[in-house]
Structure formats: C-alpha cells, structure tokens
Image (cartoon, coloured by chain):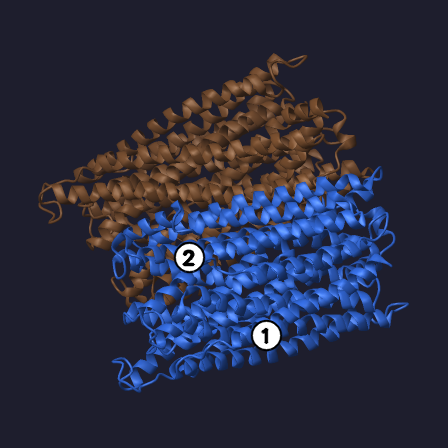
Chain colours: A brown, B blue
C-alpha cells in the first residue's frame, strides 16, 4: 500500500479519535453537579456574552472571508485571465480557504461552549476537593485541545486525499486558518483587555472593590473576555500555527529530490496527535501533587510518547533518522524557550522580585525595570530558536548526498519538521492553555456565588498553576511560530521557483546586500511595531469608552455603589461596548499587515526582474525577526508585571493598598495589552504575512517578467 | 598633482581652518560679560563637577584603551605568530587606534570646557536681549562642532598621508573613536539621567520644588549631567559616526575596479566641513525671527552649500555625477527622517497631544500611548533609510559597466557616500545639538542666580528652540548611523575578501537562508535589546542610590528643606554618586556588545569554512536592524513623553500639579533613560559592533581555514 495513502487514512482515523475523546470529555464535564441558582445565572450571562461576541465577530469575519475568497478565486494561483488557467485548482484553493476559516471558527466555538460550562462545574467541584476540580478544568480545556488538533489534521489529510499533490490547496487551507486567527486573536485580545483594564481601573483603583465584585458593571465582561480572548482566540492561534507548520512541511516535502516525503509529514503529525490524546487521557492530579506539577508532567509524558512513537515509525517505515532528530531538536528547544520564559515571569526568581521591589520608588521604576527584563528575555529565546534552526539544518543537510541543491532542500525540510515537532504536542498545549481561563473564571464564580473561603482558596491554587504552565506553553507557541515562519520562508522560495521555470537559474538568494532584500528587511521590521501599536491604541481607546460607561452606571443606578441587595448593574452594556469596540479596532490592524505585504511585493516587482520576490523575502525576514523580538519582549514584560503585582498582593513590600502596590497595578495595566493583546497576536501576524507572500509570489513574478 | 595627495592636504587645511574658527568662537564667548558672583560660583561648581567626572571617566577608559591597544597589536590585522607578519602595519593600526580615542577624548573635553563657560555667558547675555543670548549659546556649541569634525578629517587625512593606502589604520582610528564614544555616550547618559530622575523624583514629585531649585542637592549634578551627557557624549557619538562613515567609504573606495576613489571621499568630506564652517559663521537670529527658525535656517544653508560645492568639485575633477546624486539622496533622507521625528515629538501635532490627553486617565495610559507612538514612529524612518540605501545603490550601480562585480562595488560605494553625505554637515549638527544643553544650563543658572522673569522667559524660549531642532538633528544622526553601518557591512565583505584569496570564489553572500547567517541574525537581534536593558537598569540602580542620598541630606542638614539663607546642600556628594555609578554601570554593557560579537564569530568559525564570516554577517545585520528599531522607538517615545509633560505644564488638561501632570511626569521619567541613555547609545553600539567585525574578520577566516 502507498505510504502516503496509508497516512492520509491513519491521520483521518486519529483525528476522528480525537473528536471522540473531545465528546467524551464534554459529556463528562456536563454531567458534573450543577451550581447554585446564582452561579448558574452568572454562568449563563457569561455564556450568553461570549456567544453574542462570537456571533458578531464571525459575522464581520464572514464578510471578510467572502471577499478574500473571491479575490483568491480571481487571482490565485494565477490570474483568471492568464493562459491555460486551471479552474479546478482555483476552486480547490478557494474551497480550502473557506474550509480553513470555517474549521477554525468551529474549533473556537466548541472551546467557548465547553469552557463556559466547565467554569461553573469546576467551581462546584472545588467544594469536594482540589483533585476533582482540577479534572473538571483540565478536561474542559482538553475538549478544545482535541478539537483544534483534530480539525487541523483532518483538514490537511482530507485535502491531500481528495486533491492529490495539491500543495496550493493546503496553502489555501492554512491561509484561511490564519486570517481567522489573526482577527480572532486580535479581536479577542482587545475585548478581554478592554474589560479587564476598565474593571480594574474603576473597581480596584478608584473604588477599592475586590476583583470579581458583582457590583462592578464590567465584571461579567471581564469573565467573558477570558473566554473569547484566551480560549477562542488562543485556540484559533494554535490551530493556525499547527496548520501552517503542516503546510510548510508539505510544500517543502513534496518537492524533495529523491521523492516526496509528504507521507512522513502526515505520519509524524498523526503520531503527535496520538501522543497528545494519550497524554490528555492520562492527565490527573496525584494525591500529593500540586496542580502545576500535574500539568507539566502530562506535557513531559506527551513529549516522550511522541519521541518514542515517531522513532518506532521511522524504524518501521525506514524514514531517515536524521529527520527524526530534527523534530526532537524542535521539542527540546520548546522546553528551553519555556524555561527561559519561566525565569523572567516566575515570582520565585529575581526579575519579578526586583520589579516588585522597584515599585516602592513609584510607577516609573516599575515600568523601567519591567521593560528592561522584557528586553533581556528576548536573547535566550532567540538563541534557542537560532540554534535549533541551525541544528535541524545541519542534521538533515547530508541526506541530499552529493547534490548541494538537494542537500539544501533536505536541510529546509529538517527545519520544517523541527517546527512540526514543536507543534506535534499542540493538543496537549491547547488543553493546558484553555485550562487557565476556565479556572480563572471559576474563581470569579466562586466569589460571586459566595461559595466560601475554602473553595476560593482551591480555585486560587488551580489558577496560579495555570499561570505557571503558561510560561512553558508560551515558549512552545513562540518557538514554534519562529521555526514555522523560517520554514515558510523556505517554502516561499519553492513556490517562486514553481511559478517560473527561469527563476531557479537567475535567482541569487536572499542576500542581505541585495538592495531590495535590505529595503524589504527594513520595512518588514517596522510592521510588527506598527501592528502592535494599533492594537494597543485600540485597547486604550476602547477602555476609555468602557470606563465612561462604568462611571455612568455607578452615578445613575441608585444603590449600586453601596451594594443594596437586589440592585444589579447593566452588565450587557459593558459587554456590548467591549465587543463593538474590539471589532472596530481589529480590522485596520489586520488589513495593514496584509496590504503592506502586497505593497512591498508590488513595489519590488516594478524595480527589477524577480524584484518582488527579493523585496518580499527581505520583508518576511524583517517581519519575522522583529515580530519575534517584540512578541518575546511584550509577552515576558507583561508576565513579569503581572506576577510582580501578585507578589506584592501576597503581602510583600507593603502588600495590597501600599504605594508599591499602586505602582505595580500601573505596571500590570501596561502589561495587560502587551501580554494578552499585542504580544500573542504577533505570532499570528508573522504567519499571515508569510502565507500572503507564499500565495502571491506567482503574481509578482508575472508582473516583473512582463516588465523586464 | 595627484588628486589624492591634493585632497589630503586640502583636508588638513580645512580642518585647521575649523580649529581656527573654534578658537575664534571660544574667545568671542569668553569675552562676553561675566555673571553675578552667585552665578559664577554655581557655574564654577558645574564646571568642576564636569571636569571631575570626565577625569574619572577618561582614567577608566585609558585602562580599557591600553588593554585594547595591546590586543590589537597582538592579534590585528593578523596574529603576531602568523607567517610574514607585518609589524609596521601592526604599529600603524595600534597607533591609529590610540589616536582615535585620544582625539575623541580631546574633542569632548573642549566641548565641556566651552559649554561650561557659555552657559553663564548666555544667561547674562539674555539680560540684553534674545539675539545676543542666542549667539552666545550657538557659538559655544559651535566650538565643539568645529573641533569634532576638524579632528575627524584631520585624523583621517594625516593617517592616509603618512601611511599611504593603509585602510587598516583608518579602521583602527575609527575603532578608537567608537570605543570611546560607546563608553562616553553610555557613561554620560547614565550620569545625566541618574541626576535628572532623582532630582525630579525627590524635588518635584515629593517636595513640590521647582526645576533648578538651589535647595535640591541634585540640582548641580543635573546641570553637570547636561554637559557630560549631551555635550561630551554627543560630541563623541558624532565624531565616531563621522569617522566611521569616512572609514567605510575609504575601505570600499580603495578597492573599486577602475581605480581608487579615496580622493573623492576626502574631497567630499572636506567640502562638507567647509560648508559647515560657512554655515556656522553665518548663523545668527534675524530681527523678527525665532531661534528655532534661525537654527533650522543655518542647517538648510549648510545643506545647500554642500550640494553646490560638491557639484562644482565633481564638475572640476570629472567625478561621476551618479555618486554626487547618492550623497544628495543621503542629505534628503536625513531631512525626511527628521521631519518624521518632528511629527511624533512636536507638541503642535497629534501624538504629543494625545499622550497628554491620555494622561488624564492615569500613568498606565501615558505609558501605553507613548509606547504606541514610539512603535509607530519607527516605520517612516526605516522606510526612509531603506529607500535611500536602495536609491544610492541603483544610482551608482551602472558605473561599473559590464562587470557585475564592479557594479556591486560601485553600488556599495554609493551607499557609503550617501552616509557621508548625511554626515558631511555634521559640524553644523553638532553645533545645533550642543546649543541645547548650553541654553538648558543657562536657564538653570538664571533661575538659581535670580536674574528675574524676563531672562528666564528668554532662556526658556531658547531652550524650547533647542528641543525643536533636536528632532531634525536626531533624524540625521540615526539615518546616518543606519547608512554607515550598511556601508560597514559591505566593507566587512571587502575585508574578508582581502584576508583570504580563496574567499571570493567560495563565498556565497549573506543569504538569509544560510543557517549560520540566520543564526547570527537572531542573536544579533537580541543584543541591542540586552544592551538597552543593561543601561536602563544601570540608571535605575544609580538613581536609587542618589535618591537615598538626597533624602539623607534633607533629613540631616538643618534648615535645608525650609530654604534658610546660607544653608547649602552638599552638591558634590550627589555628583560623586552619579559619576561613580555611571562608570560602574557602563563597562559591562560595553563589554557585552564587544564580546558577544567575538563569540558569534568564533562559534561560526568552528562550524564550517568561512562560518565565522557568515555568522558575523548575519549578526551585524540583526544588530543593525534591531538597533535602528529600538533606537527610533526609544528616542521618539521619550521625546513624546517629554513634550507631553511640557504641554500639560503650559496649562493644558489641568496644568501643573493636576493628576494628568503627575501621570505625565511618570511618562517623562520612563522616557528619560529611553531618549538620553539607551536610545542614543544604540547608534554607537551598532557602529562598534560593525567595526569589531571588520577588524576581526581576518582572524576568523584563519581559524576556519585551519579547521576545514
């Protein structure tokens, strides 16, 4: 039997298995005991708010997806009016694009639905002890984990099965996933931080209310934000990274000298999902364990399982072990980047404590020290990514034998497989990550539902474990994005080559000393900074609107401030403001990223033969490196500030209410859009830009060959 | 007569002319009327403080320079134990290195000496009107302007005259200038911001004192800081850029196919200084002019003069007009980058006003909006630099004729000449820039000397003009640094080629897809961030020490807080803390930048043939782009915060003492080390790293050819 066919089918089977596990967890969570009427009521409000936002967001995006689908049909892979136009390939690409965005939307939707059930169940389960509550939170998150990775693998396998050899369709699928992720991540990020910041500003800073005080009109919006930002947005993000890694590996793997290795890509991706399924099923808290250790343990188990399974498969199917080595390198680097992140954001380490201490001298020092640590944190991760890319390259280079061109292809394939290795255990990672907002929500529900100190203490413990593992998972996400986009850069060359037969002979590589490459590099460098600025300003503007609304409610609703029984704020109005503002602010930033790519490619095409390709290559590289730098800086600075605030709140340097605490709250507020809006959106932004370049390479070659 | 010899002599003559103008201005300023006894007394304290710091700084640096000189002698251009070692060339390089650092130190020293006279004279002159005061401030600054550029040209011409064809000696000269600039800029930056921040924190924020209140123990240190940071540091910085631009142009120009063009480099550099001399001599305030316009007018006059003079020379000596075009492109881009900077930091434009408005919602919003505008501001400047580099490249490419290799050489020469064009009017720019701290100081002296409201108003007006022109001059400085390092990257290739005959045939360019280039790119990317973080943390730590000292003085000196007549704080103690801390903090950051370059080159050399060159090429590119991005971000964000604070202080959004003002002060405090310590030091950092790579390229080639 053909190995490719075999692994297409195996992939589909494993994906279906993942869906079954997701269903099982869904019903397992659903069967857990109900909460009090109050809690169910609040839980329902959160669910309704999240649903309303998602509906509105998807409506906006549907329009965008339709327009993009039409453009794809008309222009890709070659304009409709070019000779020998291949209508079938056009239809495949367009349908794949739509499928990518729909799959992504569904995965997000599923995540939200179960997360907004699991939050209540976790809070109730906490009454009977921490272990049960842990399982409720984790399995709730795992539903999305399984759905996300299952959908990615299912989509890729189905496409390759139905349209054999169509790398364009896989690219289209990946682009669909990316555009949706870009908007979901940015939109959700703006929503959640709008609500979080304004709830804190008026509630905590002005009125001295506790976190999650039900009198605060923004408190439900804040909880909704956790779901739409962290659950749905993050699900879309990792769905996108996963699909992009598969796409890059498929594109490079399909053109290797000595035969396609797409079967191997699907084999490894399938085994990664299998390892995740097993890891997720085995995850539970031991009797004397803390929840953080339980989460990390299942990550390590999954990683080991993946390494063993793929080694076995390589032995069985005689795959080159050098490529296996490359994927293992990817895994290791994920862990290293995670550990580096952990150092800068863990409150037992120097950076967080130093920032907390500096806060005693006022907010300026909170900011300066946090920014400094954020700047510092970039280097170890960048070195890690650099070493892993180089290691994967050199490991796989010799496979090509005597032919340098073949060697380079295998080297690039090695980098793509390293990225795939990092993302292989993404099912586990999404589960861990979605666990965070669920237990965060359950803490709020326990507070609002009056479940007592013990339950709040348990949910607090679960919550803090979520924050700790976040460091590792974020390390994986950023590292994987870095390797994936390097692979996409290599794929970009393949695509350009395929688009023009004379290209390979004339193309001189992306030499930094080529003025168009350098020009692209400089422009690409500025885009992630501008993109981040637009998102941060969006949060800023939106939060101003919401603060006004909260003030209005406290002024106009009699008895609200005093907490008169029966007086309830108008929660929906705040949700509405957050949602409407988020949608308004996300579109320009997303469009800017896409349009600037096209402009650079077009401008380059006018200058010289293949000028568009040179300029775009530089642009991609600039965009990647600056995106990585800023993403690491912002995520880690934000994490440091967050934990410095918590460290002070736990009684250090004067504790809650002290001047140091006030300064730390300022730091945390600055860090919020850093770490939850701009930072993580950059991952998606660099993927989208890389895919746009891949998709449009052919067009720019056509333009410049017409001119030169 | 040989053109090269001619322009070496002409260069020396023009340099001597510049020194004469500097002397003339020095005595002109010195002859101006004296101030009151109080003012002379304070002025003397500032002078003494600045001298003491400089002495201490130069002592520390002398040790460093000596060690580096020994290392240079032993290892460069080839190790002492290699075959056919050329002792003469070693001596030339070592002496040139020492000369570069000594020239730089002398230029800084001269600047400080005259600036600490001119500050008093300007304050006194303000009693007789603004025009006289303007001339006093400007001519005081011009002394350093002339000294800096004269020294640069004199050094380069002398070296080329004495050791014909020795590009290595010019490189050594440039490296000497750079290392000194790195430490002078970073050390001065830490000193000045330590004093500024702690004076503000205790004086303004805690005790509600005015700026420059003589009761504040840190007030003299603050004034000393203006001189050692802005005058001496900035002088060293631009001396370094100027020499580096000449060095890059000389290296590339000496290896051109079709004959050396070093004569042209010296011709253009000499005419640039001549244009600056004329521009500086003509600068004065018209009767109805404001000082800002007067400063900008002389900049434009100098620019026009330079363009005309070089066009004439090109006609006369039959230089290719395409190269002339490249230098003019450089000039234009300097103006464009300056205008972009102006938009983001001018209080009549949206960004500053928006940040001021956002401050009403608290310091977190001041920070978020300022960071956003800082991020945004990078793109236009990066596009400007990218376009100018590409334009210079394409303009000069055809000069090479049918030979692509020759074409590329001329294209690179074009970029180097564009950088030189930008820096040609540096004499004017230094004069403008040094004017700023002088009038800033004179304002403080007028306040402390009790010269009355009218004089303070005049010095305020002069000061604000200084801030406005700063935008343009900073644009030139950053743009020029960008182009210079691109040229140094090209020079790096030439140097590597010269070091190994087989190199040219095997070297495949700095292709981004080469794993070592990419690895270097990623590591290089992280270095400016780490460097900035180290400097900012240095200011942070040092300011903490100084705040403690100020508190101690207010607590322990009876009558100080109340302003009892005759009670004077212990100013020297604060100066001492600032100086000692600055020296302690600057060394690790500077060494880190240099050592990381060597480590990357060494690691690369172990991996493959010419691996060190590939890794270093990527490292340089990463370092350049990230340095530019962060320098633009930090300088502009800092400028925006500074002016937002001033905008509020002038009565908007509640004015002085309002909550918005308090938030804006936090923003300004964060911005201080951004714009005056880390941001401008990055310019020098990227130059130093580029020069280190250029100097050590030969060694890494030796290592890797031994291994492979």
CA neighbours of label 1 inside 10 A, class few (<14), some (14 to 19), many (20+): some
Report whether B231 appears left or right of A294. right
Give the residue displayed 35% in from the left and 53% down from the top: B366
Visible residue check, residue A221? yes
Q: CA distance from mark 1 to mark 2?
A: 45 Å
User: Which residue, given by chain and number where applicable, does mark 2 sit on?
Assistant: A640
Query: Considering depth in this image, is A553 or A165 the residue closer to the camera?
Result: A553
User: Which residue, given by chain and number where applicable, does mark 1 sit on?
Assistant: B110
Report whether A110 appears left or right of A273. left
Above or below, comparing residue B162 to residue A288 in the picture = below
Among the 4 quarters of the image, the one containing residue B460? bottom left
Above or below, comparing residue A629 to residue B546 in the picture = above
Q: Numbered disc 1: what chain?
A: B
Query: Considering depth in this image, is A323 or A541 the residue closer to the camera?
Result: A541
Give the residue displayed 44% in from the left and 52% down from the top: B345
Mark seen at residue A215 = none
Residue B161: x and y, percent? 81, 66
Visible residue check, residue A470? no
- For the N terminus of chain B, give its image quadrant: bottom right
């Amino acid at each position: 039997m053909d190995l490719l066919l075999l692994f297409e089918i195996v992939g589909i089977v494993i994906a279906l298995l993942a869906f079954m596990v997701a269903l099982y967890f869904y019903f397992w969570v659903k069967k857990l005991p109900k909460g009090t009427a109050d809690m169910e009521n609040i839980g329902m409000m959160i669910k309704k708010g999240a649903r309303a936002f998602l509906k509105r967001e998807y409506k906006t995006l549907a329009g965008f997806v339709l327009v993009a689908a039409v453009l794809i049909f008309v222009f890709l892979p070659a304009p409709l009016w070019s000779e020998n136009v291949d209508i079938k390939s056009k239809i495949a690409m367009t349908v794949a694009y739509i499928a990518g965005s729909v799959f992504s939307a569904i995965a997000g939707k599923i995540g939200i639905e179960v997360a907004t059930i699991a939050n209540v169940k976790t809070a109730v389960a906490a009454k009977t002890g921490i272990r049960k509550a842990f399982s409720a939170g984790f399995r709730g998150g795992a539903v999305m984990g399984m759905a996300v990775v299952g959908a990615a693998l299912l989509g890729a396998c189905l496409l390759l099965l139905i349209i054999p050899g169509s790398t364009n369709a896989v690219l289209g699928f990946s682009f669909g996933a990316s555009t949706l992720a870009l908007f979901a991540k940015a939109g959700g990020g703006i929503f959640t931080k709008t609500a979080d910041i304004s709830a804190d500003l008026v509630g905590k800073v002005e009125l001295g209310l506790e976190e999650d005080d039900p009198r605060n009109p923004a408190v439900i919006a804040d909880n909704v934000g956790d779901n739409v930002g962290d659950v749905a947005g993050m699900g879309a993000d990792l769905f996108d990274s996963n699909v992009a890694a598969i796409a890059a590996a498929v594109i490079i793997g399909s053109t290797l000298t000595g035969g396609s290795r797409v079967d191997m890509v699907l084999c490894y991706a399938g085994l990664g999902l299998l390892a995740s399924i097993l890891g997720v099923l085995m995850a539970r808290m031991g009797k004397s364990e803390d929840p953080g250790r339980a989460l990390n343990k299942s990550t390590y188990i999954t990683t080991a399982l993946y390494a063993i399974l793929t080694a076995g498969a390589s032995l069985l199917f005689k795959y080159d072990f050098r490529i296996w080595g490359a994927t293992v390198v990817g895994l290791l680097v994920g862990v290293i980047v995670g550990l580096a992140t952990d150092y800068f954001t863990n409150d037992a380490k120097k950076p967080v404590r130093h920032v907390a201490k500096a806060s005693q001298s006022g907010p300026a020092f909170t900011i300066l020290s946090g920014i400094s640590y954020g700047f510092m944190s970039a280097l170890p991760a960048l070195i890690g990514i650099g070493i892993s890319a180089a290691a994967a390259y050199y490991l796989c280079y010799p496979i090509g034998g005597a032919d340098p061109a073949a060697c380079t292809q295998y080297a690039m394939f090695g980098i793509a497989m390293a990225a795939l290795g990092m993302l292989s255990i993404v099912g586990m990672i999404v589960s861990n990550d979605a666990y965070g907002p669920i237990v965060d929500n359950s803490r709020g529900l326990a507070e609002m539902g009056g479940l007592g100190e013990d339950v709040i203490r348990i949910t607090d413990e679960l919550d803090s474990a979520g924050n700790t593992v976040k460091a590792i998972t974020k390390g994986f996400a950023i590292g994987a994005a870095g390797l994936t986009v390097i692979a996409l850069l290599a794929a970009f060359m393949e695509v350009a080559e395929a688009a023009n037969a004379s290209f390979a002979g004339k193309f001189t590589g992306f030499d930094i000393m080529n003025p168009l490459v350098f020009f692209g590099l400089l422009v690409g460098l500025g885009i992630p900074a501008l993109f981040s600025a637009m998102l941060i300003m969006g949060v800023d503007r939106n939060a101003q609107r919401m603060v006004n609304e909260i003030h209005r409610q406290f002024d106009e609703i009699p008895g609200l401030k005093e907490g008169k029984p029966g007086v309830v704020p108008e929660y929906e109005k705040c949700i509405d403001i957050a949602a409407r503002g988020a949608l308004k602010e996300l579109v320009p930033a997303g469009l800017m990223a896409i349009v600037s790519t096209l402009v650079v490619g077009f401008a380059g095409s006018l200058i010289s033969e293949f000028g568009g390709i040179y300029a775009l290559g530089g642009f991609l590289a600039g965009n990647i490196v600056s995106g990585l730098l800023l993403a690491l800086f912002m995520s880690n600075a934000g994490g440091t500030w967050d934990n410095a605030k918590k460290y002070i709140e736990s009684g250090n340097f004067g504790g809650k209410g002290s001047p140091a605490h006030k300064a730390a709250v300022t730091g945390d507020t600055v860090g919020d859009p850093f770490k939850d809006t701009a930072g993580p959106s950059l991952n998606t932004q660099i993927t989208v830009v890389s895919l746009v370049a891949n998709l449009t390479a052919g067009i720019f070659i056509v333009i410049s060959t017409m001119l030169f």
